[in-house]
């Protein structure tokens, strides 16, 4: 909508509106990679309290973190809309401040969203920043610590595997966050959000099907996925785009200490990446029984 409105302003030659804003957009283009521009007023909107209570969304801590250090939280799974990541780490109505005093969280999203006029301002105001290497490095390099980069590691591709009752993660090829952690000496923390994949149903799209083939091609072209999902309506439960009212339990695991290596080798990156996947699997296995996942269900890492 923001892009459409901008195009209409240009077509109808409302230059006194679009020229100043586009000029501002050009000079402000680096802000999403420099910590953004959050607004306490918007993060405190009452609607976010209702958003949290609707599912409801819970945040669970397994170990204290040192506020004199910075951390990278690897959030899993993406689900359709990464509701747990947004509810817990972008609004001021989660238990984040109580559980992690002295920390500021930064939820990283696709850089392309920050090229949407006006919408980018809203995104930054709620605490969202770019997921580019430069952006993550900016957050975790803060002197004195106290910053947490939250990255939904599976990204758009993982949303295509977000089916109820399944726990499939796209992680084996995601190693950029490991290199950043090594370069800055920042501890990695696996985070698993139980219930994330239960909020929507998705049209069956197994790998190799024509639907999945089209989705994969569109994802490569546009940078974001187009899962064909549905859930409930506002006044009926049969069909709609409103998510099901299913509890989300986002469990923050134990930190993985990382020694700073300014120029890590491929072997060092691979070793830490393997350790991260092992810790993530342990986190899932330790807590799955508490949140309704059958004992025979295992984590699938792709």
Image (cartoon, grey):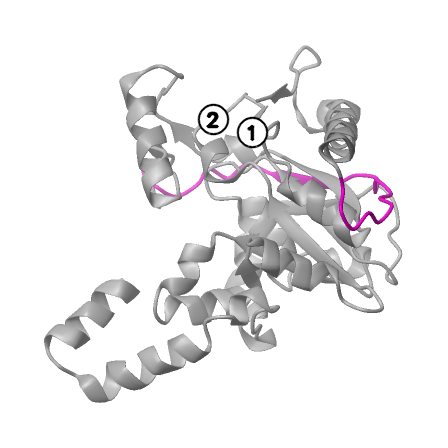
Q: Position of residue 72 (x, y in %)?
A: 72, 49
- Which element carries disc 1, helix, strand or loop? loop
Q: CA distance from mark 1 to mark 2?
A: 9 Å
Q: Position of residue 8 (x, y in %)?
A: 16, 71
- Which element carries disc 2, helix, strand or loop? loop
Tell me the crowding category of disc 2: few under 14, some 14 to 19, or many 20 or more residues within 10 angstroms, Cα based.
Answer: many
Quadrant location of the N terminus? bottom left
Residue 200 position by quadrant? top left
263 or 232, nearer to the observer:
263
Frontmost of labels 1 and 2 is 1
Q: In the picture provided, is 133 more to the left or to the right than 121?
A: right
Quadrant location of the C terminus? top right
Tell me the crowding category of disc 1: few under 14, some 14 to 19, or many 20 or more residues within 10 angstroms, Cα based.
Answer: many
44 or 265, nearer to the observer:
265
For mark 1, what is the residue? Answer: 170
Q: What is the magenta range?
A: 239-264
Secondary structure predominantly adopted by residues drawn in magenta: loop
**Above-or-below relation of 236 to 163:** below
> What number is the disc on residue 161?
2
Circles 1 and 2, Cβ within 8 Å, touching? The answer is yes
Q: Is residue 229 visible?
A: yes
Q: Position of residue 40 (x, y in %)?
A: 61, 75
């Amino acid at each position: 909508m923001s892009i459409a409105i901008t195009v209409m302003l240009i077509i109808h030659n409302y230059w006194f509106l679009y020229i100043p804003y586009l000029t501002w957009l050009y000079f402000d283009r680096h802000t999403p990679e420099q910590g953004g521009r959050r607004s306490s007023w918007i993060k405190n909107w009452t609607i976010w309290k209702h958003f949290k209570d609707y599912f409801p969304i819970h945040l669970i801590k397994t170990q204290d973190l040192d506020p004199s250090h910075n951390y990278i939280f690897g959030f899993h799974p993406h689900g359709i809309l990464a509701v747990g990541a947004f509810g817990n780490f972008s609004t001021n109505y989660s238990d984040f401040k109580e559980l992690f005093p002295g920390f500021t969280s930064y939820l990283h999203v696709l850089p392309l969203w920050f090229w949407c006029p006006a919408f980018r301002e809203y995104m930054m105001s709620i605490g969202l920043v770019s997921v580019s290497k430069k952006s993550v490095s900016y957050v975790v390099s803060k002197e004195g610590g106290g910053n947490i980069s939250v990255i939904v590691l599976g990204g758009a591709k993982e949303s295509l595997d977000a089916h109820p009752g399944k726990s499939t993660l796209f992680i084996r090829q995601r190693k950029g966050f490991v290199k950043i952690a090594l370069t800055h000496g920042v501890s990695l923390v696996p985070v698993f959000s139980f219930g994330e994949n239960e909020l929507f149903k998705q049209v069956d799209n197994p790998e190799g099907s024509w639907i999945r083939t089209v989705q994969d091609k569109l994802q490569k072209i546009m940078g974001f996925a187009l899962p064909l999902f549905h859930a409930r309506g506002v006044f009926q439960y049969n069909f709609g785009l409103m998510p099901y009212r299913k509890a989300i339990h986002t469990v923050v695991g134990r930190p993985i200490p990382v020694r700073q290596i300014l120029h890590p080798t491929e072997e060092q990156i691979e070793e830490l990446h393997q350790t991260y996947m092992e810790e993530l699997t342990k986190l899932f296995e330790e807590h799955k029984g508490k949140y309704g996942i059958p004992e025979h269900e295992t984590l699938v890492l792709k």
